[in-house]
Image: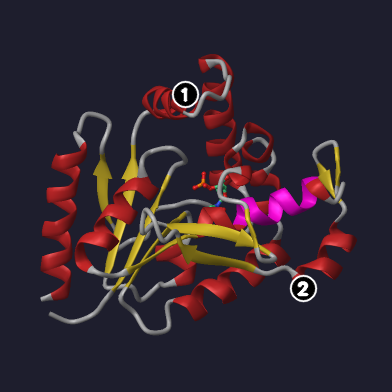
Amino acid sequence: MKRITIAIDGYSSCGKSTMAKDLAREIGYVYIDSGAMYRAVTLYCLEQGLFHGDEVDTERLKDALPDLNVSFRLNPETGRPQTYLNGRLVENDIRTMAVSSKVSIVAALGFVREAMVRLQQQMGREKGIVMDGRDIGTTVFPDAELKIFVTASPEIRARRRFDELQAKGEPGSYEEILENVKERDRIDTTRTVSPLRKAGDAVELDNSHMTIPEQKEWLLAQFRKAAE
Ligand code: DC
């Protein structure tokens, strides 16, 4: 079997990360959550007071970006990768509603995307990688041997995110989350730089009514086909 690059793109909260992580563990590949990188930059902007309402102080962010270090290290207990911002563990801080409601704004900035895409391409130089995001099959790895495009209805995605937050003991209203999911879909698909879209050669997976084991089987079959 050859070592390949696997690009998993799709809408927010449709379970991309869980499936990408599980697949990577199963086949012994590196997993990179590209959304976590945009979230880490957003956390930085919030902490440094670079937001003025829904506007980002782009001049200050441009100055700061070259020194911002976003990296992933494995949690020794769970074996799962965790996100670090300038050496600080921010895995939980980047998943709050505060970050979720601002991240699309940061992810729409061309200079931020350029910097993140460069980093992502470096991380994938050796292949043997599963990366999930919005533009992985179209922009980051247009030559990836396996591209998956995941979809699920907004209501199902909002329910999943709501359950996730509840499990963590974080308050959140289903209606608010549903609005956030729809708003992010709108921004992600209509932005001028690298909008979310299915690559021509991507395989589509609508997992609205699929169980995790069913999804896993489907993915492994796709992997075997692409890597043989
Ligand atoms: O997958 P996620 O919800 O953690 O992504 C967070 C945000 O980052 C989301 O609004 C879309 C954006 N994103 C992006 O524009 N490009 C990527 N490759 C990954 C995420």
Image quarter in which the N terminus is found: bottom left
Left or right of 151? Residue 13 is right
- Residue behind mark 1: 162
Image quarter in which the C terminus is found: bottom left
Mark 2 or mark 1: which comes first in sequence?
2
In the displayed structure, would residue 179 be above or below residue 58?
Answer: above
Which residue is painted at 20% across and 60% down in the image?
26
- Is there any visible trace of residue 225 in the rendered image? yes
Start and end of the magenta stretch?
38-46
Residue type marked 1: Phe
Residue type marked 2: Asp
Q: Which mark is residue 67?
A: 2
Which residue is painted at 39% across and 49% down in the image?
17
Around disc 1, counting alpha carbons within 10 Å, would you say few (fewer than 14), some (14 to 19), or many (20 or more)?
A: many
The one of 103 and 201 positioned closer to us in this rendering: 103
Which residue is painted at 67% across and 69% down in the image?
69
Left or right of 184? Residue 130 is left
Left or right of 69? Residue 79 is left
Which residue is painted at 42% across and 77% down in the image?
124
